[in-house]
Image (cartoon, helix red, strand yellow):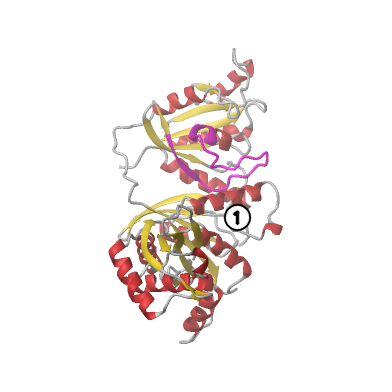
Amino acid sequence: MAKPIVAIVGRPNVGKSTIFNKLTGQRLAIVEDTPGVTRDRIFCDCEWCGNKFLLVDTGGIEPRIDDGLLAHMREQAQIAIDSADCIIMVTELTNGVTPQDQDIAGMLMRSGKPVVLAVNKCDKIGEPPMELYDFYSLGLGEIIPVSGVHGHGTGDLLDAVCAHLDFTRDDEDGDDRITVAVIGRPNVGKSSLINHILGENRLIVANEAGTTRDAIDTLVENKYGKFVFTDTAGLRKKGKVESGVERYSVLRSLAAVERSRVCVIMIDATVGFTEQDSKVAGYAHEQGKACIIAVNKWDAVEKDSYTMDAMRKQLEEDFSFMSYAPIVFISAKTGQRVDKLFETIHFVDIQNGTRVPTGALNEMLARATAKVQPPSDKGKRLKVFYITQTSTRPPTFVCFVNQKALFHFSYQRYLENQIRETFGLTGTPIRMITREHGDGSVKAGKV
């Protein structure tokens, strides 16, 4: 069964994300002195005294505002409250008890869930300040003074939380989960895709670009396997990335790519290929991730029987540097071909982790060199003695040759194509490393 879930809630800008980062030991949530920075729910595993649970950070709750993003954020927080086994309500000492705090406390009491009240920004060690006792008026019981910045009181907070949790349930085994980063330009439908997969408004969706700021993890299990989808902030040109919050959002998105196994590169069918699409895809390619190009909003395109083939051919030219990536035409709005996307994710993940036996590689090499003779220069001909695979994710091959200078890029590409033709490896980049026979030096080429 799943690990217990603990949600952190409170009004905006009381330090929820700072406490979240302190408890998890990671800088997963963006922290800035701007209300509303955290908009979606952020999940992370947390461990205390050998007990593991899932910690959820939420956007600030504004109970009395019914319009705009703040209303969306309140809805997200309510979903987190409904799914939690225990709730940490965060307030802060400097402003005392506010009307918003009272409204949120009432909401939590009505939920019937156990609540631990944490009063943040108690930064001084020693006797608690007299103002702390005002928070008993919220009617939530014991108060835990904490400092999200310095970490004071976080041990007491975790002790109080764990006292409300049932750890007799077995943890899920996550070793066979496929981590998937959904990346692309702003407003191409990344959050809409994950919401459709889940069948709920798990992520905020709005026509306003930049709605998603954090990289959000979502657990999915279906007939195709177990997946962890990460919705990421839209990646824009460096010159258009503003300082502060958006810059950190882009860093979170890049980090999400690095820790994923598969990258779904979403593009907007109604807009077509842009230069920024190639930059987003190029980053995933450089990181050696299995890649899929998902053409979203296909339902909004006027088409005939030739439209898909024509667009596929054009995209193959546009993404010529990653010709290995399969192209899937989908609609996050209607669910068109989302099942096909799952099948493709599972397939390319297997390809990315494929290991080819050395014997089979060298049989292929013998055929390839007989078919196309290695190049020569000034009377010296390249000799490729043998090839072996050294690692996976991505598949990495070492070619032992007589002289590295003779191993021209075009012949490396030819051998890569022969490897793909023989062993498949669809959806994954290949790394080719050149090493002179008997030489310990290495020259890596990304192909």
Q: Is residue 329 visible?
A: no
- Find the magenta span and give its range: 20-46
Q: Tell me if residue 330 comes above or below residue 250 in the rendering.
A: below
Q: Position of residue 439 (x, y in %)?
A: 45, 55
Query: Which residue shows up at 34% across the image and 42% down it?
Result: 2
Q: Is residue 381 magenta?
A: no
Total tally of numbered discs in the picture? 1
Q: Is residue 40 magenta?
A: yes
Quarter of the view holding residue 223:
bottom left
Query: Which residue shows up at 45% across the image and 27% down it?
Result: 158
Relative to 288, 98 lies left or right: right
Q: Tell me if residue 373 comes above or below residue 216 in the rendering.
A: below
What residue did someone put label 1 on? 211
Magenta-colored segment: predominant secondary structure: loop
Query: Furthest-bottom residue in view?
Result: 305
Q: Position of residue 105 (x, y in %)?
A: 53, 32
| Three-letter amino acid code of the residue under disc 1 | Thr
